[in-house]
Image: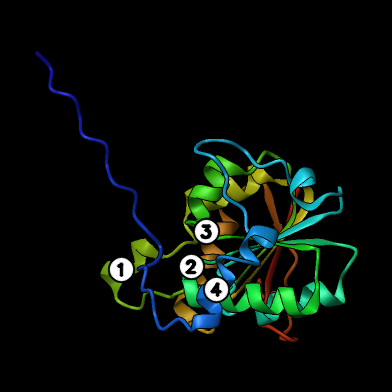
Amino acid sequence: MTQPVPERRPIRSFVLREGRITEAQRRAFAGPWHRFGLNPADEQPLDLTACFGDSRPVTLEIGFGTGEALLELAERHPERNWLGIEVHRPGVGHLLLRLDELGLENVRVLRLDAVEVLRRHLPDASLDAVQLFFPDPSHMKRHHKRRIVQPEFVGLLGRRLRPGGLVHLATDWEHYALQMLAVLGAAPQFRNLGGSDGFAERGERPLLSLIHI
């Protein structure tokens, strides 16, 4: 009798550390979370039009940290909706409090693994743009497999972005930047919009910009 092959555990691109969370941030999960947070059911795709209450273009930010950059972008671009993913509770709590304070209605928050969100909870061609700023570079060679920018991840982006959608990546670690360039350069559904070396000019962020075609 053939023995079933055990399911392999997925490689995570993060280590979940709770960190120090303030009482106010803790309360945010009992209050503002119900206004801005999303809890998709297992294997069910999100209806982003229903989540935001309108059909404006959606930009996904993966790993927003404390959320201050996401807040600034959402304030600057009210014509767009912003979907933020972060796993660390203090950062999520901070963003929830600031969203409540500012009264922004064009931001929604997920506290889940970004790869699982892309794989299970976002429909095809549902995103206008994806931004990933300064992900963990996982410096040690044996941890490079934990870097989020891998072929499977890029394949998911290609399916979830609409035609013409943009990917913005930034890192301050040269080795990771070159890996990003190589992985995305090998993906036929993307076209690099950077300069002759493949990288965009350094502006507010050192962005590697690619367009989905």
Percent across and percent down for residue 132 are: 60, 68
Q: Residue at x 48, y 66 (%)?
A: 87
- Sequence-earlier tag: 4 or 2: 4
**Residue 99 horizontal side relative to residue 150, left or right:** right
- Sequence-earlier tag: 3 or 1: 1
Q: Residue at x 48, y 71 (%)?
A: 89
Q: Nearer the viewer, residue 165 or 22?
A: 22
- Residue neighbourhood size for the residue with mark 3, other residues' Cα within 10 Å, grouped as few (<14), some (14–19), many (≥20): some
Give me the C-alpha separation between circle 4 and circle 2: 40 Å
Residues at marks 3 and 4 touching, judged by CB atoms closer than 8 Å? no
Secondary structure at badge 3 equals helix
Tell me the residue that label 1 is attached to: 143
Disc 3 residue type (three-letter): Val
Disc 1 residue type (three-letter): His
Give me the C-alpha separation between circle 3 and circle 4: 41 Å
Secondary structure at badge 1 equals helix
